[in-house]
Amino acid sequence: MKIIRNLAELTSPLCKPILTIGNFDGVHLGHREIFQRLVHKARSENGTSVVLTFVPHPLKVLAPAHAPRLLNTHAEKERLIEASHIDVLICLPFDQQLANMSADQFVKDILVQTIGVHHLIVGYDYTFGHNREGNVTLLQQLGKKYNFGIDILEPLAEHNVVYSSSLVRKMICAGDVAGAVRYLGRHFTLEGVVSHGLKRGRHLGFPTANLITEKEILPIPGVYAVKVRRGERLYDGVLNIGWNPTFGNQTVTVEVHLLDFDGDLYGEVLRIYFFERLRNEKRFDSVQDLIAAIQKDIARARQILSSCQLIDFREYLNSLTTSEDSTPYGKENG
């Protein structure tokens, strides 16, 4: 996948671009349906599948206090879009100048003259331009004016529940990491660098890796059954998010205990996949009570994880795979 981070890199329009536009936070099943249609359309017309997204999220510029905590880091989003077999990703810098651009000017200057849009695929509720003055009705009118086709997709839903980034955010914030899989199409994940902590876990007999992560959104504090990717190997684990109330921490920490592992992890990058919430954080009356609770957490995590398989991006994308595809599936772990 080619990534364009500045429109100045486009010295001429792309070859018959089949385009979609959006923030695509989470790259959930609704987004993947759009990407799937985009890729099929591009292949059927010998065109170029193109995703246009914004960096940073527009609300971080327009209304920072109301900007959502994002489900993916931008690097994760890029990997997930690449794993969707997209040909070109345009990461358009979002600033006040772009925010002030009228809907007509955005279509004419950016989509038509710069990118050379041949066909546009967007969701039913897409809005754009200054003060969100543009909508799908205007896009249809501009498509006729500037000679590009347009498909408007109805919402993808399950039992009348529409797939959306806001829905997944609510589920993650509530700790429903197991339920979120049906909308994400994969397990919620985060990546972190192992840093030095207070080493309490080691003293208790359960050494933990203290993770520093760029993830904006974390599940509600508590204990979780997780899988941990270290390099090419996957471990079962138990992860705690929170203040460690037994010891009265002043800041939230993310600590993971890898089952059946003994070694030094400092400075390494680990990726965590959340499977199930085990319990709330709790203040224990004694260290022995805490140790007993951890032993129960580990036993339950082993039971859960022994019968669960990691769901990643590739299963959904099998219908897009051909012998000519060269996208390395090992890079889709957003």
Image (cartoon, grey):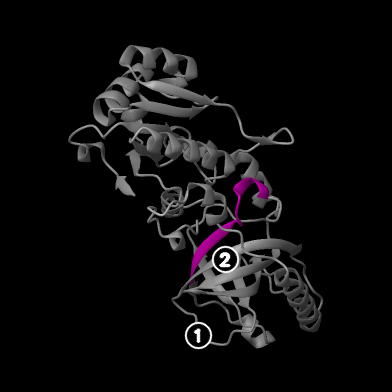
**Amino acid type of disc 1?**
Asp
From the image, state whether disc 2 or disc 1 is nearer to you.
2
Give above or below for 197 relative to 330. below
Q: Is residue 206 magenta?
A: no
Q: Is residue 191 magenta?
A: yes
Residue beneath disc 2? 272
Query: In the rendered structure, which segment of residues is drawn in magenta?
Result: 182-193
Question: At numbered mark 1, what does the secondary structure look like: helix, strand or loop?
Answer: loop
Taking depth in this image into account, of 251 and 220 the one nearest to the observer is 220
Determine the image quadrant of residue 247.
Answer: bottom right
Residue beneath disc 1? 264
Taking depth in this image into account, of 131 and 53 the one nearest to the observer is 53
State which tag comes first along the sequence, 2 or 1.
1
Q: What residue occupies the far left of the structure in this picture? A: 11
Is 266 situated left or right of 249 in this image?
left
In the image, residue 108 lies at what x, y percent? 29, 20
